[in-house]
Structures are given as C-alpha cells and as structure tokens.
Image (cartoon, helix red, strand yellow):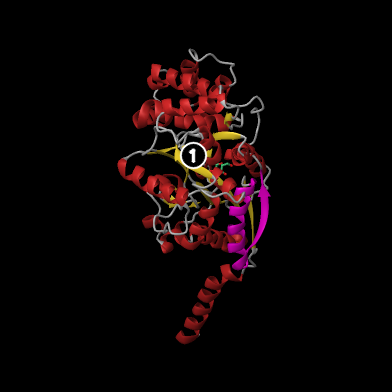
Amino acid sequence: MTARKVLVQMMGAVSLLIAAPSAMAQVKEVEVVHWWTSGGEAAALNVLKQNLQKQGIGWKDAPIAGGGGTQAMTVLRARVTAGNIPTAVQMLGFDILDWAEQGSLGDLTDVATKEGWDKVVPAALQNFSKYKGKWIAAPVNVHSTNWVWANKAVLDKLGVTPPKSWDEFVAALDKAKAAGVVPLAHGGQPWQDATLFDSVVLVTGGGDFYKKSMIDLDDATLKSDKMKTVFERMAKLRTYVDPNFSGRDWNLASAMVIKGDAAFQIMGDWAKGEFINAGKKPDTDFLCFRFPGTQGYVTFNSDQFVMFKVGDDRKDAQVKMALAVMDPAFQSAFNVVKGSVPARTDVSNEAFDACGKKGMADLKEANAQGKLFGSMAHGHAAPAAVKQAMYDVITKHFNGQLDTAKAPDELAKAVAAAK
Ligand code: GAL
C-alpha cells in the first residue's frame, strides 16, 4: 500500500470517528420533571417550552405538583430506582449535590466553558451548579424567601403602610385582625411553615445567627434562648392565620391576598407570579417588601436544571436545553413572569417591574455585603435530611403539638440525628 493510500484510509477512519456521534439518531425531545403547576409557574414554564420548540426540541411534561418540590423529589427517586430516568429535572441546592455525588448527572462543563458561565453565574449559585469542578446544572433563576406580599387596597383601608420591624408587623397584623380581615394568608404545609421560619430566624438573630443555626448547624445556637424567641414569634404568627389553613396550597394562600380576603402573605417571590398571572400590578394592586426587619439580607434559592445521564441519543437535546436555560434574553423573559430574578449577572433589569428591579438590586447588595444566605426551607442551607428534620420540628410546633420552651432542644436533637 502506498503511503498516500494509508493516509487516505487513516483519514477515512478519523472522519468516521468524528461523524459517529452526530450520525446517531438524536431524540428531539426532553422529558422534564418539575413542580411548576400553579398558574404563575405554568405561565413561566411556557416561556421555556416555547423557546425549546423554536429550536426543534419537543417538551414531554412530567409535572409533580407540590410547592417546594418535596413530592417531586420523592417521585424522582422512585423513577430512577425503577430505571425510568427523565432527561432533565428541576432541582434545588443540596439535592443537586446529592445526585451528583451518586454519579447520576451529566457533565455540562463543555458547554459551560464555551459559553463562559463561570463569569456570569455568581459564586453562591456555582456552589450548587458545580461538583468537583464540573458543571452539573444550569441555573435558571434566583428566588428569595424573605418577602411579604400585601393587598394594597386592604392596607389602605386599614391605614397601614409596609411595616419596617417585627413590632410594626405585629401591629399591622393586629389591625387586620381587629377589622375582621384574615391577617396572614398561609398554607399549613411543612415547607410553607419552614418558609416563614427562614425570615423569623433572620429578623430575630440577624445574619450571623442565621448562618450559625441554619447553615453551620451549630448545636449551641440551635438550642439557644434566641431560638426560643424564634419559636415564640412563630407561635405569634400562628395566631394570625385563618382556621382553614391546614394543607392549603401556597398559591391558594396568594389568591386570598389577591382577592382581598387576606392582608399579607409571607412567601418567596414566586408568589409574584400569581399576582401577575391574575393581571395585578405592583404598587397599584399589591405591595412587595422584604420581611420587616430583614431589608439588606437575602435568603435565596435557585431553580436549576440538571441533565440526567441518559443515552447518547439524548445529549443534543440536553445541551440545547441547557443553552436555552442560560440564554440571557430567555432569563429576562422567564423571570419577569416567574417572579424570580436572573441567575446571570449580565441581564438588564429593564423588562422587570418594581418588585423584580428591587429583587435584583437587593440580591446584588446582599451579595456584596456578605448578607446573602441559602434558604433553609428551599434546600440551600443544609442537606435534605437536615432540612426534613427541621421541617418536622417546625411544623409540629406550628400546629401546637410541641411547646415553645421545648422546641429549641428538639430542633438541636433532630438536626444532630440527621447530620
Ligand atoms: C420553590 C421553587 C420555586 C417555586 C416554589 C413553589 O422551591 O424554587 O420556583 O416554584 O418552590 O412551588
């Protein structure tokens, strides 16, 4: 064989090698597990579906209702165990790291490097988007839990302006109660009780106390007198919810504020999605403000999409979905509807309403000041087992099945056992 022939044959083999992956028939569809089933959430999800459809990628919906994603994570575990693995999954904080540790997640480092994600995703988020130096998730947003949502007409009628401290908040809640309005719209589900807890910990002890108890899981701090004050305040909030609160979904609690049946809701900024979806305008129909006394701080959670290790025939679609999620124009369009703020720092605030602009400015400031902390309630402070242990104690106490005096010790014990 001549040298030329050998070379031609070798080149043929190389080009075959290169051609192989793209020659493989690619599935032009993603099956996505998520818990975005409320009106506002579904509207935001549509922005993503349409974005993918434009790129020729179909959307197979696998919704699992239940705010905060508790049920979704249970169903996901069962599906993976049964070998019925979805293409992509909405996921939060420590859950992402758990699945990465088990080796279940696809590696997005190539696309992340090419697109420069390192430069535009804040370090606080990268802590959950990367595992051992590799990108394993695409962050779509940043939500935060220390918000209050209020019906403006109701507040005007009560002669109440947004409270600035715990005491002012209590005074406003009392006024609503005296006027026969439900002061606090709330749904009695563990993750919602825990969402209140995020803010009450923060306002009671400040950033150091939040970090020591919720993130460092320091035993002495968990059982401290200050933690007793936290539980006292939780018991106080309990006196402002209506008798039908048990089991109510968060979006139905939002609807109470939207309709003017209730004055306030303490909830993450996904609640804004419900107000917007109902055609309501910030400052005109509803007010958004930081949980009184926590201005400057942000307890965040970020929805990220992970790509499970499935066949090579799904890789194209997974990469396209990751690219779509991280597209700056998409991050603006999606988060305007969702109530969250972009995960990328290079997205303009132009398209956002007053609450969105405030959310973006608050996030930037909190990040710069060291006042940005992961939300316990939404899986960004401690691993799932610890979160669940905290949920149990908080909910038991909120429902009057655990004395305030005993609650801090119970919390410390539960956390120690779950660590
Ligand atoms: C959060 C999630 C939000 C929102 C909320 C209620 O955990 O990050 O996107 O959907 O649950 O379902």
Question: What crowding class fits label 1: few (fewer than 14 Cα within 10 Å), some (14-19), or many (20 or more)?
Answer: many
Determine the secondary structure under disc 1: helix
Q: Is residue 378 visible?
A: no
Amino acid on which disc 1 is placed: Phe
Q: Is residue 359 visible?
A: yes
* Residue at 46%, 61% in the rendered image: 328
Q: Quadrant of ligand 1?
A: top right
Expressed as whole percent of the image width and height from the top left, the position of residue 266 reads 52, 34
**Left or right position of 269 against 65:** left
| Camera-nearest residue between 298 and 380 | 298
In the rendered image, residue 51, in percent from the top left (x then y), is placed at: 58, 63
Which residue was labeled with disc 1?
Answer: 94
Q: Nearer the viewer, residue 258 or 313?
A: 258
Residue shown at 59% from the left, 31% from the top: 186
Picture residue at 39% right of the left edge, 32% below the top: 293
In the image, the segment drawn in magenta is 37-64
Q: Position of residue 340 (x, y in %)?
A: 49, 48
Q: Nearer the viewer, residue 304 or 152?
A: 152
Q: Which residue is drawn at 51% across and 54% down?
A: 336
Residue 164 picture location, percent across and down: 40, 33
Indicate yes or no whether the magenta region holds residue 38: yes
Residue 83 painted magenta: no
Which residue occupies the foreground of this view, 322 or 307?
322
Looking at the rendering, which quadrant does residue 318 occupy?
Answer: bottom right
Q: Does the residue labelled 1 lie within 8 Å of ligand 1?
A: no
